[in-house]
Amino acid sequence: QVQLVESGGGLVQAGGSLRLSCAASGRTYSTYAMGWFRQAPGKEREFVAAISWRGTRTYYADSVKGRFTISRDNAKNTLYLQMNVLKPEDTAVYYCAASTAYSSPSPDRNDYDNWGRGTQVTVSS
């Protein structure tokens, strides 16, 4: 099991920035692919970004490409999501996820078996 705790969410104006963090503990964090997903009210949880266990490969949803950057620091067991040029449609609860089965980034939420509780991001217009 991998325990995941997100932080860094909040209220920001459109065009602003936030950096989310996800602290991991438990089994061999550094060998897992990690990802960020989000869920807006009344919508399904959707993929945002993912990163390979070494951090050399990343994968983004088209809606955030060029605005968000995923990264990880395996020495600190921490995953990050830098979010720039935020839009009201980015408003959602953001979840960190870890895959104990895959080392490559994946947009499929079914490939992830450990989830954090989420952090709220609200972007005002």
Image (cartoon, helix red, strand yellow):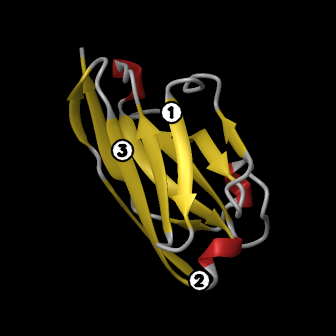
Q: Tell me whether the residue at label 2 lies in contact with that at label 3, contact meaning CB atoms closer than 8 angstroms.
A: no
| Amino acid type, callout 3 | Arg
**Residue density around tag 3, few if under 14, some if 14–19, many if 20 or more, within 10 Å:** some
Mark seen at residue 1: 2
Could you say where residue 103 lies in the image, as x and y percent from the top left?
Answer: 78, 64
Using the rendered image of the protein, determine whether residue 44 is visible from the camera's viewpoint: no
The mark closer to the camera, 2 or 3, is 3
Which of the two discs, 3 and 1, labels the residue nearer the N terminus? 3
Q: Secondary structure at mark 2?
A: loop
Q: Which residue is mark 3?
A: 19
Quadrant that contains the C terminus:
top left
Q: CA distance from mark 2 to mark 3?
A: 25 Å
Q: Tell me whether the residue at label 1 lies in contact with that at label 2, contact meaning CB atoms closer than 8 angstroms.
A: no
Mark seen at residue 90: none
* Left or right of 87, for residue 108: right
* Left or right of 20, for residue 111: right
* Left or right of 59, for residue 41: left
Q: Which residue is mark 1?
A: 68
| Residue displayed at 60% across by 76% down | 29
| Amino acid type, callout 1 | Phe
- Judging depth in this view, the residue of 48 and 68 nearest the camera is 68
Quarter occupied by residue 54 = bottom right
